[in-house]
Image: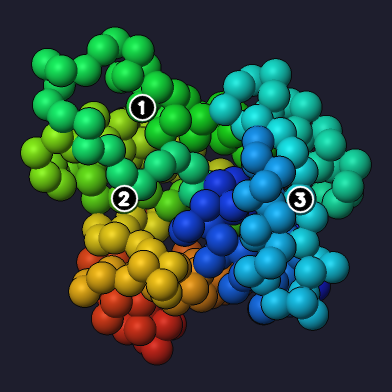
Amino acid sequence: MANSDRVVLVLGGAGTVGSGIVKALLDKGFKVAVISRDDGRLERLRSLVSPTTQDNLTTVVGNVGSEDGAAEAKEALLRAVGKVTDVVSSLGFSWWQEGPPHTQTLKDLHWVMETLLFSTFVSWKVFFPLVRDDCSCTYTFITGGAGEKLLMPGTGFLTIGAASALAFCQVLREEYPEVPCKLNQVKINTGVATPDRMRPGYLDHLDLGEAVAALVERRSSSHSVFTVNCPADLKTALLERNL
């Protein structure tokens, strides 16, 4: 199947990580779809991608964090693109520094879990059936290393939510060992930023996007976790074609 015949749904595609993935997929000739609750963020995404590829980008306003919203978004998406061959899930937020747990409320914790875990679960349940039974299809989760360590004092709720997302991905690999769809996870153990916000050791979201796009394109692995600790890991992965 040629890239031009494949339609990749990037969940969270209007965010920092997701936008780099969207641009890289479009540059490789894929058709790409993005769902977001914020029409303004979708417009900013359109301004990021190459003008020559904009016709291959489909945007849908919708909420994939609720069961009803995700179902409605799926129907709107299929009306617009007809089919989905690949899914990249890059949902959630990248930072939390609101103080130690005893200063937070149950509402705060619920919001963290809803954003990092519940939305990942709901969107997987709704969109995974579109690709599950086809060995030429892929479903890729983008997760972070914050689930395995406290980034700094005050970020504990991010660790709790990210750890839940990591556990969910592990459950899926072990619960569905024989699923035909290529099911993979890219775990990022460092910061990701746009070029104007780069810091030492951070990944450029465009470089990360190129690596994820290569993983989707190659379809050469399944039920694997690819860990990225630093920018050099991306270059090694691409050069050695071990994604």
Q: Find residue 112 and name its label.
A: 1
Q: Are marks 3 and 1 in contact (CB under 8 Å)?
A: no
Between marks 1 and 2, how big is the CA–CA gap? 14 Å
Q: Amino acid at mark 1?
A: Val
The image position of residue 227, as x and y in percent, is: 29, 62
Mark 3 touching mark 2, by CB under 8 A?
no
Disc 2 is placed on an element classified as strand
Residue drawn at (68%, 51%), measured in percent from left and top? 42
Image quarter hosting the N terminus? bottom right
Q: Which residue is mark 3?
A: 59
Q: Quadrant of residue 114?
A: top left
> Mark 3 packing: few (<14 Cα in 10 Å), some, or many (20+)?
many
Q: What whole-number distance in Å separates the C-alpha atoms at marks 3 and 2?
A: 25 Å
Which is more foreground, mark 3 or mark 2? Answer: 3
Residue name at image x 32 percent, y 19 percent: 108
Q: Secondary structure at mark 1?
A: helix
Q: How many residues crowd mark 1 within 10 Å: few (<14), some (14–19), many (20+)?
A: many
Residue that sits furthest to the bottom in the current view:
239
| Of the image marks 3 and 1, the number of the one nearer the N terminus | 3
Amino acid type at circle 3 is Thr
Near-viewer residue (22 or 199) = 199
Q: Give SS at disc 3.
A: strand
Give the mark nearest the N terminus, 1 or 2: 1
At label 2, the amino acid type is Gly
**Residue at 59% from the left image edge and 52% from the top image edge:** 14
Q: Position of residue 209 (x, y in %)?
A: 50, 69
Which residue is under mark 2?
A: 144
Question: In the figure, is residue 69 to the left or right of 17?
Answer: right
- Is residue 180 in view from this perspective? no
| Residue count near mark 2 (Cα–Cα under 10 Å), binned few <14, some 14–19, many ≥20 | many
The Cα atoms of the two marked residues, 3 and 1, are separated by: 26 Å
